Amino acid sequence: MAFSANIHDLPTITSYEQAKKWFDKTPKPPRSVKWNDHERPLKNVSAWHYRLERGVNEAYFDVCLYHTKMIRYLKPDQFGYRLVYIRGDNSKTSRKFLARNVSGSYGGEVASYVGEDNKQCVVPFSHIVHKHYKRNHEEIRHGNELFSAMLKFNPAGQLVISESDHIPVCRRVVSNERKQERAEFRKQIETVKLLALYRLDTYRANASWEYRSPFKASVATKDINDLQRALRVSDLDEELEFILTDVGQSVFDNVYSVYLNTNDLIVGNSWSMHGQSLRNSPKALASNITDKQFLAAFERALLKAVRLHAPDTYEPLPKFAELPRKFFW
């Protein structure tokens, strides 16, 4: 279970002006040795972990969470341009803290702004910054601090993309080497798939279902290490019965459970279709699972067993562009 601090009673600091106003009106705690002259509480004297820090000559203000400078607002220049540095983190408290204090933020992980060309820009910044830079990415640095994004805004509040930056992100893709491995493996299991298809009526007759997590496991979990070894060394005879019996039935049950749940054929712990009982039997609609659906799921399960199912490399995504549903730091 994930826990996070309660930050709902903290002020919202979204600009240099707001930070300066809060700093100026908040006195330094007079009887506390842990507060320095350049620090002010965002909550109370005992909550040093929520604070503002003032830079030399008020060149910037840092909005801090524990020992991390999460947001740095630089003083606007003479033309009204302003710089903001953001340091993301994957902890729940950090995301809530950023979501509260970063304008345009969604969940404290990404933010959306309008660029000078009036197009929408996406800025990702949630990650663990030091682990991230171990991947040899270019650092976004201001002074002695590392940040996830450096954003420059014009006087109209539009993002100046040419002078802004954010950490690189990417999506997972399948390499040519992985594609070749998959092709070879598919040839290896052609006979196994054919034998499993011959047993499809048996799988239908023995169908069972899971109501809460129908696709919890793509393959049977017992003896999975032996299965991986057998598939990897092309020695299928030793594990063939296990694959055809346990794995085949497990795959069919998972596909069948997904079908029943997707089509709202399960109500509570009972079966129904248009209010009619399905003869109190989960096998009543097992024939609706086609050969093609089963074989596709069976192949995916075996690919997963030998760890060939997932993409194995990363492809960089353009900066300030729309992000896919899944992206990686």
Image (tube, helix red, strand yellow):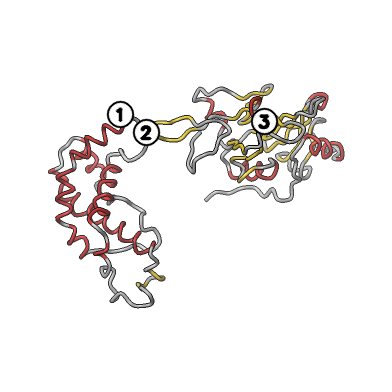
Name the quadrant containing residue 246.
bottom left
N-term mark: 2 or 3 = 3
Mark 1 lies on residue: 177
The residue under label 2 is which amino acid type? Asp
* Location of residue 194 in the rendering, given as x and y in whole percent from the top left corner: 15, 49
* Location of residue 174 in the rendering, given as x and y in whole percent from the top left corner: 36, 34
Looking at the image, residue 156 sits to the left or right of residue 257; the answer is right
What whole-number distance in Å separates the C-alpha atoms at marks 3 and 1?
39 Å
Name the quadrant containing residue 260.
bottom left
Q: Is residue 67 visible?
A: no
The residue under label 1 is which amino acid type? Glu
Residue visible at 35% across and 72% down?
Answer: 271
- Please say if 48 is above or below 260: above
Name the residue nearer the viewer: 199 or 135. 199
**Residue found at the far left of this picture:** 237
Mark 3 lies on residue: 151
